[in-house]
Image (cartoon, helix red, strand yellow):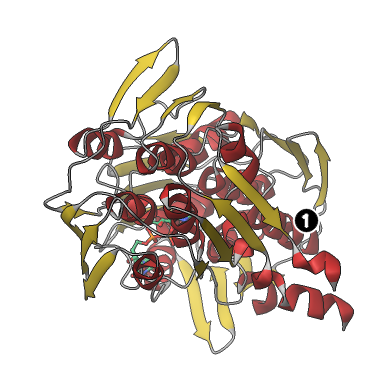
Amino acid sequence: MYVRALSGVNSLDEIQITGGRALEGSVIVQGSKNAALPMMAASLLHRGVSVLRGCPRITDVYCMEEILKKLGAVSRWEGKDLYLDCTRADGTEICGDSTGRMRSSVILLGAMLGRSGRGTVGYPGGCVIGKRPVDIHVFALRCLGVSVQEKENGITARRLRSTGGTVVFPKKSVGATEQAVLSSVLSDGETVLKNCAREPEIVWLCRYLRGMGACITGEGSSCIRIQGVGTLNGGDLRVPADRIVAGTYLCAAAATRGRIIIENPPEGELDAFLDLYRKIGGQYEGKSGKLIADGRNVRFPVTFLETEAYPGFPTDLQSPVMAVLATIPGESHIRENIFEDRFRLAGELNKMGAAVRVSGKDAWIRGTETLQGCPVTACELRGGAALVLAALAARGDTVIRGYSYIRRGYEHICSDLAGLGAVIREINRNSFI
Ligand code: UD1
């Protein structure tokens, strides 16, 4: 009862920010959430120990770790390195209580199929950014000889044949591509995935698997080929820098007209974002492996920006960019093509003095140099981080409720920003209950 009460008040966790200071300094970006989660799932494919080095200590990683432990894995942290011993992780059922907490848990189905030939997962949860169906996952598995039954409380899958196959994805999906890769690396034949997603996190997953002995080519292009192998060794890879967190911090510099150095930028993964950065008046240069970003001249609204699958502009940076545009006088226009309910922060930005108008996929943002701090509420991960940026730019004090959403993906957002000169502190009311 007590535990439930604690988790029930999580959304009361708050961040307090006194805005108006230009950020200055350098920051090291955490490991990538969206790369780490599929690597963790892939560890199930080896009956022994795998290690993810520099794994971010964030809620979603802990959630995935808990699910793997329920399947029989043993986990251990050594500093930032996560060791996963999947010697006895032979469980094949993950209930909805676990999967409902995190969208990417659904890809464990592919990993269980690869390992045991069968699996059941409850329907996945995740951020409230719109409908998040799993039809493409199911379609891909069926193309690969898996019998899939969708029931009221989850999906049950059983491998009928193990000879590989061809999937032509009807639409690009990061998770469904990862699902198909995970379910195929231990098959007996060749698998060809066409029109697959090209996101860097898929490339990192394939690198991790190749280090385990998998035979994969073509990742990063829209056609991936997998030659099945009999067994895999343990995985061991450093989790790459998080391109979305890096983009968020670059937005923080832009929103506050500051100048920051990213010590470990995700190389070549931020091109679409950096194009936009330049268009709004930001400048950047790469030097000695670092990225120096200067937001002091950010002042141009954006005529039109739309989110697209990689290498297009990432949907996960749409909200942070909206917060920056809310600080630029004039009107900007954003179209969100990936998720249909990803403008929830608009109302909160309006409370702070911006004028954001939303109609379907489109948002028009009339920004102001004088955002005003006030109490606001985060209701999902990236929108929550965007409110932090708006608060840094605003005059006066802002209290952001719903910090727990932000912690799903940001390991040290408060201390990282404080290190750049922000006046920011976290309040965890749980400790008072
Ligand atoms: C991943 C990322 C998420 C990012 C998203 C798009 C992880 C853990 N999460 O999510 O941060 O915002 O990619 O870059 O890596 N779709 C279907 N049917 C399906 C699957 C997806 O219609 O079976 C739709 C989705 O509703 C969405 C689009 O396809 O409109 C893309 O979704 P997808 O690429 O699958 O996103 P995720 O893998 O869930």
Label 1: few (<14), some (14–19) or many (≥20) C-alpha neighbours in 10 Å: many
The N terminus, quarter of image: bottom right
Residue 282 locus on image (x, y percent): 27, 32
SS type, badge 1: loop
Q: Residue at x 33, y 49 (%)?
A: 324
Relative to 70, 360 lies left or right: left
Along the line of sight, which residue is nearer the eye, 10 or 311?
10
Q: Give coordinates of residue 323: x percent, y percent.
A: 36, 54
Considering every residue shown, the one lying at the far bottom of the view is 152
Please state the total of marks drawn on the protein image.
1
Q: Does residue 128 appear left or right of residue 220 in this picture?
A: right
On the rendered structure, is 313 left or right of 40?
A: left
Q: Is residue 377 visible?
A: no
Q: Amino acid at mark 1?
A: Ala
Q: Is residue 315 visible?
A: yes
Residue that extends furthest to the right in the rendered view of this protein: 2
**Mark 1 lies within 8 Å of ligand 1 (Cβ measured):** no
* Relative side of 66 to 367, left or right: right
Comparing 88 with 8, the one in front is 8
* x and y, in percent, of residue 133 in the image: 41, 74
Task: Tell me: residue 277, above or below residue 176.
Answer: above
Which residue is labeled 1 in the image?
89
Q: Quadrant of residue 273?
A: top left
Q: Quadrant of ligand 1?
A: bottom left
| Residue 348 position within the rendered picture, expressed as x and y whole percent measured from the top left | 41, 69
| Quadrant location of the C terminus in the rendered image | bottom right
